[in-house]
Structures are given as structure tokens and as C-alpha cells.
Image (cartoon, coloured by chain):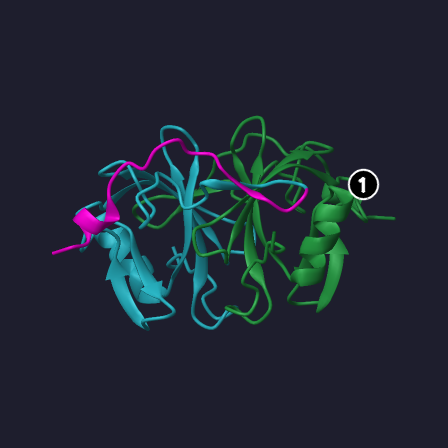
Chain colours: A cyan, B green
């Protein structure tokens, strides 16, 4: 059987990843993986990403300890995007301390409303070391 | 109040959109919006995208009639991605006829398993006209 291949060439070596809470279905974040990040994610069972701003591979939780354990990977019809259903250690995926990076709703008149009540952790504490 | 602005400049004028079924929470597709697609989506309440391959704005469902009605828009912490919770007219978001573009699971040994039982529509019929 030929090895499965995602189409990393379509967008400059990266595919967008939708990270979804495996228990609640909530979308927690969107990030990017290059070929190496995808390979390490599959090998380790922990989410690895490629940072476009820092130009480097990183493991989610390497500083905070809040790693993401992969439960299931789904790929799309064009093989140029993936959904990762995960368990979020520590309970929050966002570096701001909220559970989801998508914690604000855009109202029709243009205002942003916070839809998560409380932060799960204090970023100043988690990222201080 | 200053007008709300997404960061379209970060990735060449486009933001990735996660399209999620508002009732089930299922991730249906990932697509891209430029500033104009985002504006039209907000104005009309129907999803508009920017096609990278065809270099043009398009409305989802313009050929098939399977439009996507926006129920809620969420933006992320960096304002460079959005989740659109929608109602999918016709029941399927994928051009292949499946409900979700993410209808295949990647198994640990590299095989792809179909996780949706049946197609919702026959693409040959829907896109024949």
C-alpha cells in the first residue's frame, strides 16, 4: 500500500489544522503543520506545529505543560487540511488562558462578545518560568 | 467604537475559516476568505469564500443550491482565523456529496477509513447543470 500523503505543497509546505476537543466537539484552535510536525505528531501522539512567525517546529505544551493528546485524525477530501480531535491537558488550549482560542463571538454590528466565562489558567503564572 | 478588523495581511490577504455545523458541532470544511468574502458573508448571512485555485470570490452553493446560512461567527485570539457555525442547506458541505469534507479517518498505520456511511447527494446530478 502506498504511504498516505497530505498535500503540503499547496500552501508553501504547510497544512492548516483544526484542533477540536474530542469530548465536546468544541473547536479549540487553528494552527499549521509542516511535514515534520505532522510526522512527529503521529509518532508521539502529541500535537506538534510549525510556527510561521518563529520559523520553527514546536510541541504544544512544551512551555506550559499543557500538551494535546491526539485521539483521532481526520483528513479532508483534497488532502490539504486535517482535523485533530484531542484531549487538552490542563483544560485550556489558548495561550491567553481561555479554553478555546475562539472565545469571542462577532456580533452583527461589529462588537466582540466574550463567550467563555472564566480563564482556565493565568498566563502570567504558566509562562513565567 | 473602532470597526472590528481581522488580520488579513498575515497570510497574503486570506484567513482560514473553520466551518462547523451549528447543531452537531461537526467540522464540515476548511476554506479561505479574503476581506471581500468576509464582508459579503456578513452582509448576506451566507458563506462566501475566496478560491485560491480559481482566484475568485464564490458563494458556497451558487451551483448546487446548497448554501450555508451563518448562525454565529467566532474569531480567535490573534484575529487571524474564524469559526463559522452554520446551517448547511441540502445537508452536505463536501463537493463529493458527503456531509463533511473530513469524512476519512487516518489510522495509525497510514490507511484512510471512511467514517460517513452514505453520501447525502450524488455530485454527478447536483453539478450536471
User: In the figure, is residue A65 to the left or right of A120?
Assistant: left
Residue A42 picture location, percent across and down: 28, 52
- Establish if B50 lies above or below A100: below
Label 1: how many residues lie within 10 Å, few (<14), some (14-19) or many (20+)?
few
Residue A76 picture location, percent across and down: 52, 49
The residue positioned 48% from the left and 34% from the top of the image is B115
In the picture as drawn, the residue positioned furthest to the left comes out as A129
The residue positioned 39% from the left and 41% from the top of the image is A100
* Image quadrant assignment for residue A88: top left
* Image quadrant assignment for residue A15: bottom left
User: In the figure, is residue B18 to the left or right of B53?
Assistant: left
- SS assignment for the magenta stretch, majority: loop
* Residue B119 seen in the figure: yes
User: In the figure, is residue A60 to the left or right of A118?
Assistant: left
Residue segment shown in magenta: A109-129
* Residue B60 seen in the figure: no
Residue A33 picture location, percent across and down: 37, 61
- Establish if A115 lies above or below A47: above
- Per the image, label 1 sits on a secondary structure element best described as loop
User: In the figure, is residue A97 to the left or right of A109?
Assistant: left
Chain identity of mark 1: B
The residue positioned 37% from the left and 36% from the top of the image is A21
Say which of A107 and B118 sits in front. A107
Say which of A31 and B89 sits in front. A31
In the picture as drawn, the residue positioned furthest to the top comes out as B23
Say which of A79 and A70 sits in front. A70
The residue singled out by tag 1 in the image is B65
Residue A45 picture location, percent across and down: 24, 47
Amino acid at each position: 500500500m502506498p504511504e498516505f500523503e497530505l498535500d503540503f505543497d499547496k500552501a508553501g509546505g504547510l497544512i492548516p489544522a483544526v484542533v477540536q476537543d474530542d469530548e465536546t466537539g468544541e473547536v479549540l484552535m487553528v494552527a499549521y503543520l509542516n511535514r515534520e510536525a505532522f510526522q512527529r505528531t503521529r509518532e508521539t501522539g502529541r500535537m506538534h506545529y510549525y510556527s510561521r512567525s518563529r520559523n520553527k517546529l514546536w510541541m504544544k505544551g512544551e512551555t506550559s505543560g499543557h500538551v494535546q493528546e491526539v485521539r483521532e485524525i481526520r483528513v479532508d477530501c483534497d488532502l490539504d487540511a486535517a482535523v485533530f480531535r484531542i484531549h487538552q491537558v490542563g483544560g485550556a488550549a489558548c495561550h491567553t488562558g481561555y479554553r478555546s482560542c475562539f472565545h469571542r463571538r462577532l456580533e452583527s454590528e461589529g462588537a466582540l462578545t466574550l463567550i467563555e466565562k472564566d480563564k482556565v489558567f493565568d498566563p502570567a503564572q504558566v509562562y513565567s518560568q
